[in-house]
Amino acid sequence: MATRRDFLKGALAAGTLFGAGQTAQARETHHVPEGALGLLYDATLCVGCKACVAACKAANGNPPEFSTVDHLWDTPLDTSGYTFNIIKMYRNGTMETKDSEINGYAFMKTSCMHCADPSCVSACPVSAMTKDPVTGIVKYDPNKCIGCRYCVAACPFGIPKYQYDSPTGRIGKCELCRHRHKDGHYSACAEVCPTGATLFGKTSDLLAEAKRRLSLKPGSITTFPRGRLGEAAAPGVTWLPEPDQSYEGPVGHYQQHIYGEKEYGGTQVLKLSAVPFEKVGMPKLPPYSSAATSETIQHTLYGGLVMPIAVLAGLTFVAKRNVKPDEGDEQ
């Protein structure tokens, strides 16, 4: 007759053998969809007017926020559940020269980067965060959200924010004004930008425009578009016609780096700057996403039932150590 000790030995052996036979495949970082939509922000063209901040709030029905006593230019200081887009300022020394790292100042836009392989989507346990397979827009569904805020912790840019002051709080973040697309409008921040510092368009077109600017001689004159770049086709969307808003201006002294082209596996929001990106608040990130790494680890632990089996084996060991010998075993 099988004894309790025999059962425990069998469970331990089965768990070890089954777990050892499983292997996990590391997945690759997802790429930006071919028809992805996004933004190009050129800090050298930004004048810090914050028209984009006001337009974003109006388009998304968000109230004004004041995080400083004097309610001056730099409020609110950061994005929140009610502020999806802000312009931050870099300051150094005497602040005499715009876009100068030393004794200068510069601006930087902060909003959702719409990662090719977003960690917020990977971390969300109920698929409230999703990435559109065509436009690549990282979307949020408040009806599915359970308020766990895993997306808040997972984002390397610190973008998704929770409305803590509301009993029915939800996540707030930029969705490229996708709710306006059906009416022919695109991202309000790009529509209203007076200098074309923020452009809306197809990510591949925006990347080509960014590379064009980096190839030009600093100080030379070139044409800068404003508003929407190219056709930026999207399913079921017909953009409202708009006049040519391009203008001529001097080329900035750019860092030879397009932020978002490779960071984190690529993002649909691209940025140009004359001041090093680390100095204007953009994190230095590897060319692969954390989502790929974390999902590989999860699949390693749970896909082959390695973790549950390891826990079972541990419990089995503890139980075995504390079980008194059966009378039959001592004979």
Image: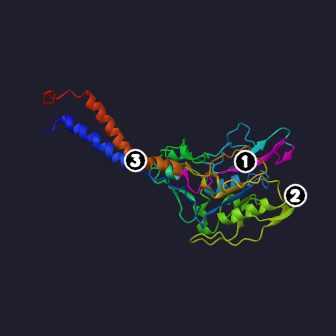
Separation of marks 2 and 3 at Cα, in angstroms: 56 Å
The local crowd at label 2, few if under 14, some if 14 to 19, many if 20 or more residues have their Cα within 10 Å, is few
Q: Mark 1 or 2 closer to N-term?
A: 2
Residue identifier under label 2: 219
Name the residue at 35% across, 43% down.
308
Dot 3: element: helix
Q: Quadrant location of residue 205?
A: bottom right
Q: Is residue 196 visible?
A: yes
Quarter of the figure that contains the N terminus: top left
Q: Nearer the viewer, mark 1 or mark 3?
A: 3
Q: Amino acid at mark 3?
A: Tyr
Report x, y in % for residue 157. Answer: 62, 47
Of tags 2 and 3, which is closer to the observer? 3
Question: Image quarter for residue 190?
Answer: bottom right
Q: Which mark is residue 302?
A: 3
- Amino acid type of the residue that numbered disc 2 sits on in the rendered structure: Gly
Within 10 angstroms of label 1, few (less than 14), some, or many (20 or more) residues?
A: some
Residue range corresponding to the magenta coloring: 96-120
User: Is residue 308 rendered to the left or right of residue 5?
Assistant: right
Q: Is residue 131 above or below residue 35?
A: above
The residue at which mark 1 appears reads as 277
Task: From the viewer's perspective, tell me whether residue 91 is left or right of residue 145.
Answer: right
Q: Are marks 1 and 3 in contact (CB under 8 Å)?
A: no
**First along the sequence among labels 2 and 3:** 2
Q: Nearer the viewer, residue 230 or 61?
A: 230
Looking at this view, name the residue that lies furthest to the front. Answer: 331
- Comparing 52 with 24, the one in front is 24
The residue lying at 75 percent from left, 57 percent from top is 197
